[in-house]
């Protein structure tokens, strides 16, 4: 592990003064919250900050539901949010995505903010024995393009990076139009979660739109996402404690036997959490006939690009959407 | 920025890292330590306090052999920096028995022969204690899901599940009594 100075500031203003940079892989000063991803990356020498700024005890860990919707303090743990009664009742998609993530131990440690900023599981990114990784070492190439890329993205890719964003939580939240509240030296701002992560393009080492020093303080979900029929379907290589091969987050409003409005997002296939507005438009007004659902889900293939081993995901993700819509529609 | 660095280089640079004064509360006893900031809670337990019951399997949060309780909740000690565990109440496998009386789950692991090589056992037991106290030991299926953070390379899973079921029954009969 690269040596670092560990800062343990007492309050948020002291944190911000240290100018840590979240979401880029060449930052000399970084944050640590729950640490479940950061410590792995430190151990593997993937991240080598000179200074690590602890967020322990300085960020809000509250979970509030009110007329405005849901507000999750950035320091709330995955376990706390997943088990929160009002989250389970009004935003079950969030609880379900969390319970399908990681292990009970990690869910007790990992925070909301950290979950959104966790790094890709791309094995070429996580193993410094591979020289070529544009995300880890800008300009070094991408070993996944012609390598073992069964787990890699088919949406939002570039010729410089095809790494998948690994968060299940982010997929559920993007489907529910969530935003993140940010605080920096310049003040507070709110950013739609769909805009937090950048596409890799030719700068895959820049992962988010966070400015130097900015920190995620909370996640907000609008009230109009409450009470929808929803399902988080996760397809993976083993039954538990595994990242998604493909996942589908679906939330629908129904009117008799028809879908009035649908929200659809995918995980395991995109370089960022992937919302599918074209599929949503096609589902609006549709009934639950399998052929109708399949036709709408087929639009998810627009813009996809397989790279060899991962081509199967393009068909699998359409089937996952159909299955998730059927399960959501069958819910009381 | 270069990619791979040699462990020797990292080690040499590490000598320059100023140690931190860290106070850890383990099994009810306060310990004052001077630690390199990079020290994980697991390494602090094993290398500095010689509490070697918690095991290091992968060191990356994948196997669960290092599971301990922090403020009553199970965590992976290999993913926690020791300095950030200050002020928390930590319980390890060494703190589970009451004197000579084993915890019910320790006893049921012996009764059910829930191990072969034993390397994962202390992590399994600490995770199992939490699994029961959380109320996630209602059925073999539920136990398997909520114990998925602990791997057993010997494949003693059937016996581990049975041991947790037994201990959960003891615990619920105690509560009812």
Image: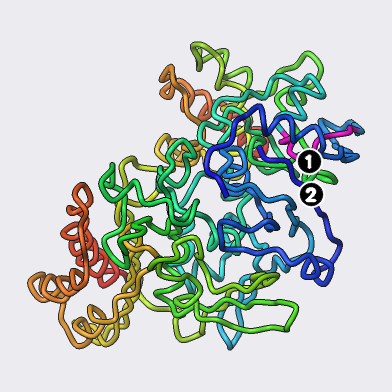
Q: Is residue B12 magenta?
A: no
Say which element carries label 1. loop
User: In the figure, is residue A156 to the left or right of A167?
Assistant: left
Whether residue B32 is visible, yes or no, is yes
Mark 2 highlights which residue? A6
**Residue drawn at the location 78% of the way across and 40% of the way down:** B37
Q: Residue at x 46, y 52 (%)?
A: A101
What is the number of callouts on the image? 2
**Residue A156 location in percent, x, y?**
32, 68
From the viewer's perspective, is residue A16 above or below residue B150?
below
Residue A64 coordinates in the image, percent (x, y): 64, 75
Assess disc 1: are there few (<14), some (14-19) or many (≥20) residues with their C-alpha within 10 Å of its C-alpha: many
The answer to which quarter of the image holds residue B38 is: top right
Are circles 2 and 1 on residues that touch, CB within 8 Å?
Answer: yes
Check disc 1 and report the residue beneath it: B37
Please report the bounds of the magenta region as a residue range: B33-41
Q: Position of residue A24 (x, y in %)?
A: 56, 61
The picture quadrant where one finds residue B27 is top right
């Amino acid at each position: 592990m690269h040596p670092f100075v560990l800062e343990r500031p007492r309050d948020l203003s002291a944190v911000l003064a240290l100018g840590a940079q979240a979401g880029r892989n060449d930052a000399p000063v970084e944050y640590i919250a729950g640490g479940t991803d950061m410590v792995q990356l430190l151990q593997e020498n993937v991240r080598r900050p000179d200074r690590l700024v602890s967020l322990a005890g300085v960020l809000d860990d509250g979970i509030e539901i009110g007329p405005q919707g849901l507000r999750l303090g950035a320091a709330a743990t995955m376990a706390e949010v997943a088990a929160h009664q009002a989250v389970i009742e009004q935003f079950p998609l969030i609880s379900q995505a969390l319970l399908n993530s990681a292990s009970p131990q990690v869910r007790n440690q990992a925070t909301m903010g950290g979950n959104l900023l966790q790094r890709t599981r791309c094995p070429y990114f996580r193993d410094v024995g591979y020289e070529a990784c544009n995300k880890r070492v800008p300009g070094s190439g991408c070993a996944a393009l012609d390598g073992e890329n069964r787990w890699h993205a088919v949406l939002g890719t570039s010729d410089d990076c095809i790494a998948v964003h690994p968060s299940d939580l982010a997929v559920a939240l993007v489907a529910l139009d969530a935003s993140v509240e940010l605080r920096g030296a310049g003040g507070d701002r709110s950013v739609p979660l769909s805009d937090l992560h950048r596409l890799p393009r030719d700068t895959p080492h820049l992962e988010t739109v966070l400015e130097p020093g900015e920190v995620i303080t909370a996640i907000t979900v609008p009230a109009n996402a409450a009470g929808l029929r929803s399902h988080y379907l996760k397809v993976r290589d083993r039954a538990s404690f595994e990242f998604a091969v493909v996942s589908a987050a679906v939330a629908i409003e129904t009117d008799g036997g028809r879908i009035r409005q649908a929200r659809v997002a995918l995980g395991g296939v995109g370089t960022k959490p992937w919302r599918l507005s074209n599929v949503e438009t096609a589902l609006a007004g549709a009934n639950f006939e399998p052929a109708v659902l399949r036709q709408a889900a087929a639009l998810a293939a627009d813009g996809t690009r397989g790279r060899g081993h991962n081509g199967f995901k393009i068909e699998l993700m359409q089937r996952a959407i159909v299955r998730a819509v059927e399960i959501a529609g069958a819910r009381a | 920025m270069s990619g791979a660095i040699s462990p020797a280089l990292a080690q040499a640079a590490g000598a320059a890292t100023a140690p931190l004064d860290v106070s850890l509360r383990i099994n009810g006893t306060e310990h004052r330590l001077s630690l390199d900031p990079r020290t994980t809670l697991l390494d602090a337990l094993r290398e500095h306090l010689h509490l070697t019951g918690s095991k290091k399997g992968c060191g990356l949060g994948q196997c669960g052999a290092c599971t301990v309780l922090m403020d009553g909740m199970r965590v992976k000690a290999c993913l926690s920096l020791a300095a950030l565990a200050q002020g928390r109440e930590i319980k390890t496998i060494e703190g589970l028995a009451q004197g000579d009386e084993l915890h019910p789950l320790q006893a049921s692991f012996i009764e059910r022969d829930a191990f072969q090589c034993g390397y994962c056992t202390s992590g399994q037991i600490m995770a199992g204690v939490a699994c029961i106290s959380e109320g996630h030991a209602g059925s073999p299926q539920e136990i398997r899901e909520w114990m998925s953070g602990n791997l057993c390379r010997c494949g003693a899973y059937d016996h581990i599940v049975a041991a947790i079921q037994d201990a959960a029954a003891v615990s619920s009969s105690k509560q009812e009594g």
